[in-house]
Amino acid sequence: MSRHQLGDELERRGISRRDFLGFCASMAAVLGLPDTATNAIAAAVENEARPILIWLEFQDCAGNTESFLRATHPTVADLILDSISLNYHETLMAAAGSQAESVRQRTVRDNVGKYIAVVEGSIPDGADGGYCTIGGRSALDIAREVCGGAAATIAVGTCAAFGGIPAAAPNPTGALSVADAVPGVKNLINMSACPANAENITALIVYYMTLKQWPPLDQYRRPLFAYGKTIHDNCERRAHFDAGQFVEAWGDEAHRHGQCLYKMGCKGPATSQNCPVVKWNEGTNWPIGCGHPCLGCAEPNFWDTMTPFYQRLPEVVGFNVGKWIDPVGLSLVGLAAAAAAFHGIGEVARHHLGKTRPIEDKAGSEK
Ligand code: SF4
Ligand code: SF4
């Protein structure tokens, strides 16, 4: 789509040039780029060829597809996402059966090393892959074929990134993450969360279109722009945590006044994502903003390590809050807390959770 065509499409959808540039500025903000990056983003979105995407959907609830398509009214982001070439998406494409399979095979064959594989859902290897088959082939087989020929693979959602709910103990289907199912996959990027935030998916693609490379990643192969800080770092209730003002029961006065949800089980200190900044539903609100604790959905094995959801994390000490937080409720793992420096709280809490295993970096990192 040329700049002229994009302009026409924006006008047809009632999106002004000012709104378009506002979107590009918001993408720069999500990505942590300076304002001066706005023009470069606008030029890339207007002029660069859209990447070819092959979207594989395996063992999941389709929540990431819903997130990706979730807009309630036309936005610039919709336009950009609509414009991306989704050559194969099992939920969205009109083709079915052998016709659909041949589209995928042809796209892979004709674009080896050029397309982006997007994987949604975990990949089961139990029963010789028999728990998830498409067109007579196992998800494992298809993932290895498609991810193996991709320029990059984006694992959207915690199921694809870390196994997610299907991999929760006792993991009856042998559910695997992309990293475990396709060892050595090139340029793997994990966009974890349940579901992944559409703003972050959009920002990742805009980053790639603008800079022709993938963003820096954390130890779990998640982009630092979205996962570089904990929920706790940016939480709007943080002042209440520091002041020792905690909700003790649903609907109590502290809850009605928007105080800290740590004692109600909030996993924000052990969870990295930009929810407090980007929020959900086009920036309308986010779980803690609504009075509900963070469940830790962006973290590896959260279904096993972050439960029971409404029991508090092991004591998080720092900012003089240790003296405020009573020592009850440590049944999650029963470990004493260690002192934590400001940016170390998430790591300390994560280590003290004990059950969160580090993800081995089985994926390649070629850029
Ligand atoms: S514990 Fe949860 S609610 Fe409290 S400040 Fe941290 S992230 Fe926010
Ligand atoms: S606030 Fe926590 S549980 Fe909610 S979406 Fe963000 S990371 Fe997931």
Image (tube, rainbow, N blue to C red):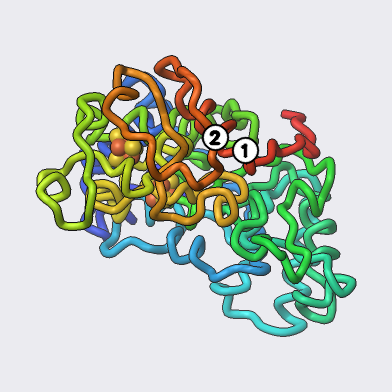
Q: Which residue is mark 2?
A: 335
Tell me which residue sits at (47%, 56%) in the image.
308
Horizontally, residue 20 falls left or right of residue 1, namely left
Is 256 left or right of 340, judged from the image as shown? left
Instruction: Work out whether residue 332 can be spotted.
Output: yes
Q: Is mark 2 within 8 Å of ligand 1?
A: no
Residue 14 pos. (x, y %): 21, 57
Q: Quadrant of the C terminus?
A: top right
User: What separation in Å lies between label 2 and label 1 (alpha carbons)?
Assistant: 9 Å
Q: In front here: 257 or 21?
A: 257
Q: Residue at x 68, y 53 (%)?
A: 117
Under circle 1, the secondary element is loop
Instruction: Rate crowding at label 2 as few (under 14), some (14 to 19) or many (20 or more) other CA atoms within 10 Å.
Output: some
Label 1 packing within 10 angstroms: few (<14), some (14-19), many (20+): some
Q: Does any portion of residue 2 appear in the rendered image? A: no
* Residue most extreme to the bottom: 97
Is 353 situated above or below 244?
Answer: below
Residue at 40% from the left image edge and 45% from the top image edge: 329
Q: Image point 42% across, 63% down: which residue?
A: 69
- Given residues 86 and 320, the one toward you in this image is 320
Task: Please indicate whether residue 73 sits to the left or right of residue 193 in the image.
Answer: left
- In depth, the one of 303 and 352 nearer the eye is 352
Q: Which residue is more in the foreground, 183 or 351? A: 351
Q: Are marks 2 and 1 in contact (CB under 8 Å)?
A: yes
Q: Amino acid at mark 2?
A: Leu
Q: Which residue is mark 1?
A: 354
Give the label, 2 or 1, closer to the camera: 2
Residue reaching furthest to the top: 341
**Position of residue 133 measured from the top left corner of the image (x, y, whole percent):** 78, 77
SS at circle 2 = loop
